[in-house]
Image (spheres, helix red, strand yellow):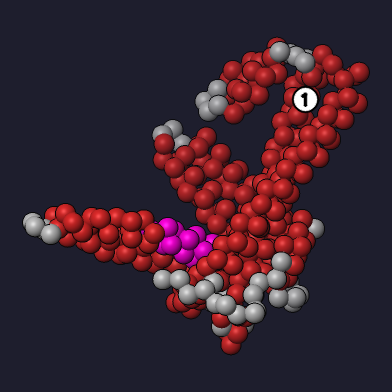
Amino acid sequence: MFHQHNSHSDFSFTLLLQALRGVTLWRPNVVYGGCILAGAILWEALASWGQDATGAVLGAALFALAILIGYLAAGRLLVYDARGERTPGIWRSILFALRAWPRLLLLVVMEGLLLLGIGVVEMLAFGLTRIPGFGPYLVVPLFPLAVLFNAALLILAIIVFNLSGPALWHGEGVAKALRHTITIARKRPGSVLLMMLLLAVLSSAVALVIVLLLYGGYALTLAAATPFLANALYDHGGGEALLLDWLPNLHVAVQQWQQSVSPIVHWTHSGQRLSWFAAGILTFLLPNVVFLLGMAHLYLEALELEAPEDL
């Protein structure tokens, strides 16, 4: 299954440093974050509008679609940056994502069907152990071989699924993307998986740094605001209001709480919620864009090694 090259040409670890540029690229962050925010607002609006679960289910589906469109639009911008070309505008990248998301779903379904077919064949192999006489003896060699085979298959699946997006960002069709991702996974499994793991570690480190910086900024903000907003910041009703705001069908209770406290308490906790929401978006977005930019570089380098004619 594996065909690891012993070529002197392999991936450059400089792509890790290139991936860090994702923190400074504002267009991918804006388009990805904007799509997620638009999907969340639409989900909340549909969930509040409907009296049954239909609105919530439709809103959740549209929210997932918004994330998918943001992923493709941001990836399109990132692959241009990885190729060293001038990036298209935000609207052009969104139009690309609107055209490409059915292809991504089709590609993922085809990859899933391949895995399902392999799984069926493996089940049939174990079915041979039910043959009277020599069947039970087949378990001895079959079981450890299946363990090794499935471990290798898991590595291939991780690589193929993660490279599916970058293949489509590059502008490939479903058939070509499937062929390229399988070829890369089969010929360079070790080096590709290693780079993916390093990119994941790098993205986690970026997320940790962002959390520490935002926590430090929040602590300094509390220190500056406490002399003037101490009662509002430490009001015991604030936590209850924060909980009620996020629970469905409790808007009346929230309004009653807001009327029972001074405006300064209400607006202080609103400011705190807004800062937490912004911090959550930043903590999610920036590490993700770093990882996606690294994946764009990784795919282009792998394609250059295995299919340079398609670059």
Instruction: Pinpoint residue 307: horizontal percent, then vertical percent.
Output: 56, 83
Three-letter amino acid code at the position of disc 1 = Trp
Quadrant, the N terminus? bottom left
Quadrant hosting residue 112? bottom left
Quadrant, the C terminus? bottom right
User: Label 1, on which residue?
Assistant: 267
Instruction: Pinpoint residue 37: horizontal percent, then vertical percent.
Output: 64, 47
Q: With 160 as the anchor, is 113 left or right in this view?
A: left
Judging depth in this view, the residue of 192 and 85 nearest the camera is 192
Q: Which residues are magenta?
A: 150-162
Instruction: Pinpoint residue 9: horizontal percent, then vertical percent.
Output: 65, 79
Q: Is residue 53 above or below residue 163?
A: above
- State the residue at coordinates (48%, 61%): 155
- State the residue at coordinates (87%, 20%): 226
Q: Main secondary structure of the magenta part?
A: helix
Which element type, helix, strand or loop, lies under badge 1?
helix
Q: Is residue 72 magenta?
A: no
Q: Is residue 296 above or below residue 57?
A: below
Q: Is residue 161 magenta?
A: yes
Judging depth in this view, the residue of 243 and 255 nearest the camera is 243
Q: With 94 as the anchor, is 53 left or right in this view?
A: left
How dense is the environment of label 1, judged by Cα within 10 Å: few (below 14), some, or many (20 and up)? few
Judging depth in this view, the residue of 143 and 35 nearest the camera is 143
